[in-house]
Image (cartoon, grey):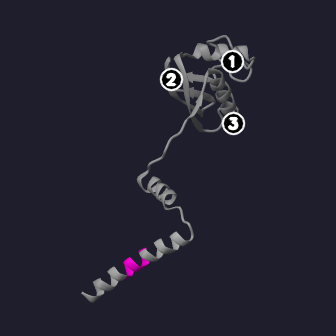
Amino acid sequence: METIEMIVYLTVAIITGILFIGFLSDWQFEKTYSQLSGIVLGEQKQSFKQVGREEFIAEMYSFWQGCGYGQENASLRLYLKENGNLTKSAIFSSIKNLSLCETMQSLENSCGSREDMIFSGEIELPSVIKLSCNSSAIIVS
């Protein structure tokens, strides 16, 4: 029984000491708790950059450049906040207007000689859109 009492007293003393030192050093307990709970429980707060259609095209283009034009595996999530629908032809009409067809191409949409984009169909907006780079293509889903 004395062994158990000693373990309990030492545990309480250690916890009290940590709290006291944390209070004196202005330790941010809430920040530490949120970081540890995120690691232990696997919770991750996802925040998405909110963009309009023009910003979406710019972000997609810079992402395409950043992943080495499909040579590196990477992903990005953006929140497209406008209403309506997003289609592959709408994206490539904007790319044509910006004269970027040499960099991001779509033979299907008369913008270059190859298909650099795999599009998962019409996306209803507003929506979170995932961009992925792999196997020499950008995947929009």
Magenta range is 10-15
The nearer-to-camera label among 1 and 2 is 2
Q: Which residue is painted at 65% across and 23% down in the image?
A: 57
Can you say whether 31 is above or below 62 in the image? below
Report which residue position mark 2 lands on.
126
Which residue type does callout 1 highlight?
Ile
Residue 14 at what x, y percent from top left? Answer: 43, 78
Residue 46 at what x, y percent from top left? Answer: 50, 41
Q: Secondary structure at mark 2?
A: strand
Residue 80 at what x, y percent from top left? Answer: 56, 25
Neighbourhood count class around disc 2 (C-alpha, 10 Å): few under 14, some 14–19, many 20 upward: some
The nearer-to-camera label among 2 and 3 is 2
Q: Nearer the viewer, residue 53 or 18?
A: 18
Q: Which residue is painted at 41% across and 80% down in the image?
A: 13
Inspect this view and state whether residue 63 appears.
Answer: yes
Labelled disc at residue 3? none
Report which residue position mark 3 lands on.
66
Was residue 90 drawn as part of the magenta stretch in this picture?
no
Q: Quadrant of the N terminus?
A: bottom left
Q: Which residue is painted at 41% across and 53% down in the image?
A: 41
Can you say whether 68 is above or below 124 in the image? below
Q: Nearer the viewer, residue 32 or 62?
A: 32
Report which residue position mark 1 lands on.
95
Which residue type does callout 2 highlight?
Pro
Residue 129 at what x, y percent from top left? Answer: 53, 28
> In which image quadrant can residue 55 be found?
top right
Q: CA distance from mark 1 to mark 3?
A: 17 Å
Is there a contact, CB below 8 Å, between mark 1 and mark 3? no
Which residue type does callout 3 highlight?
Gly
> In which image quadrant can residue 105 be found?
top right
Q: Nearer the viewer, residue 17 or 46?
A: 17
